[in-house]
Image: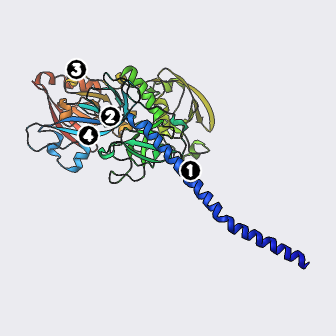
Amino acid sequence: MRLEKSHSLKIWMFVLLASFLTTPLIAEEVNSNGIETLRKTGKAFSAVAKKATPAVVAVQVRSKIVSRGGSFGSSFDNDFFERFFGQRSPRGQQPQERWQEGQASGFIISGDGYVLTNHHVIDGADEIKIVMSDGQEYDKVQLVGSDDKSDVALLKIKDAENLPSVELGDSDDLEIGEWVIAIGNPFGLTETLTVGVVSALGRKVGRADVYQDFIQTDAAINPGNSGGPLLNLEGKVVGINSAIITGDRGYMGIGLAVPINMAKAIQEQLTKTGKVQRGYIGVLPQDIEPEMADFFKLENGKGALITTVTEDSPADKAGLKKDDVVIQIGNKKVEDSQDLRNIVGFTAPDTEVEFTIIRGGKEKKVLVKVGSQAESELADTSKTGKKFGLTVQTITEEVADEYRTDEGVGVLVAEVEPSSPADEAGIRKGMVILAVNREEITTVGEFNQAIEVSEESKKALLLVKTGRFAQYVVLRLDD
């Protein structure tokens, strides 16, 4: 018995000694493996930078700003109203002209010079210049088209050939926690690379009248990064860096990028026609609050609740009804109202799509033929209106909900021609025109009729409203 105990003790001591002697070796091996893994990761980032950076460009824009006496700014000349009206007019009555300059990012997607960037980067630009990473400049740049609803714009460098380009990836394959790399020109610092992970997918922030399904990342994105690529470790573009959530316009760990699959759908249409045609079914959806689920006999709060169906719309003709809850369109899940807007908006007109709905607690399939949300159906104006630089839109119930205004009160400003009398007076898209030449209006037809008398006088008096504030503005046609 004593021999057995003594023998066991010797074995135990030998094990402890061996463990003590080999522990530094194991620790050294683990440490070496860890460093090697980090080294390989760093090499992967460097490989992406070498591959993509030559195709990342600086997008430099210049916009001519003309301020006139009698514009919004002359009466509301302070920071509060500057945020509403977008510019501050100088005091006095004499028109003044100045140039506003800015720089952001973009990336070349084909050797013949097509460049993707954000709509907000080039919005209102009179001049666009592309600067390559090697310093080469191109000042002959065509705006092929842009889409404010998705914040995507397509540029074309004229007469370009054999330019470096990046490959577009598949944003649907992204996973939370995956490494991503942002390249751009923050604060004018060219060829800046930052690294992070995908923090979240399907983010929806801010306005409900835009199409958004943002990729959230903690890769540092700052002013000037807008329009630059978000890349995966294969060096393929998975998103267009678009916005940051911050209190002081600097990096705070939350960057947002437009998924490249959404951007590709826009880019293809802009390449073919220069504009975007969206799907339309004629419903007004809303999110489902948790306490509402029981009332609609839902197992969870997922889906888009239809609150209004427009008469004779594609949805009406297909049999969709008020209080239906859409949970799937085709093979895509619908978790909220924004999902419904996104899926329908990016569905080609005349496509038949199967809607899965919950009606009275029971699942049902409805086949809907998607219609067209063509601009010609939504907005119009007379020749005189166009001379003033205005395109307006009747405020339907759906439009009123999107722009948070009142249905049947005035007309919505749908487009403002750059450097036009309307633009120079501070009128912006999304404002509401309540009256023309002191005549109250509620439709596009009434607007056209009221403004026709201004063709001879070459001036128009508009009562324009933004938010809770309204002001008269005089538009003048140059002789």
Q: CA distance from mark 2 to mark 3?
A: 41 Å
Task: Find disc 1 in the rendering and name its residue.
Answer: 37
In this rendering, does residue 193 appear at all? yes
> Which of disc 3 and disc 1 is earlier in sequence?
1
Tell me the amino acid under the disc marked 2.
Met
> Which of disc 3 and disc 2 is earlier in sequence?
2
Tell me the amino acid under the disc marked 4.
Gly
Q: Determine the residue positioned at 69% across, 69% down.
A: 20
Tell me the amino acid under the disc marked 3.
Lys
Task: Find disc 4 in the rendering and name its residue.
Answer: 102
Q: Secondary structure at mark 4?
A: strand
Percent coordinates x, y for residue 423 in the rendering: 21, 33
Task: Find disc 3 in the rendering and name its residue.
Answer: 383
Q: CA distance from mark 1 to mark 4?
A: 41 Å
Q: Which is more toward the observer, 316 or 142?
A: 142
Q: Determine the residue positioned at 60% across, 37% down.
A: 360
With 199 as the anchor, is 466 left or right in this view?
left
Q: CA distance from mark 4 to mark 2?
A: 16 Å
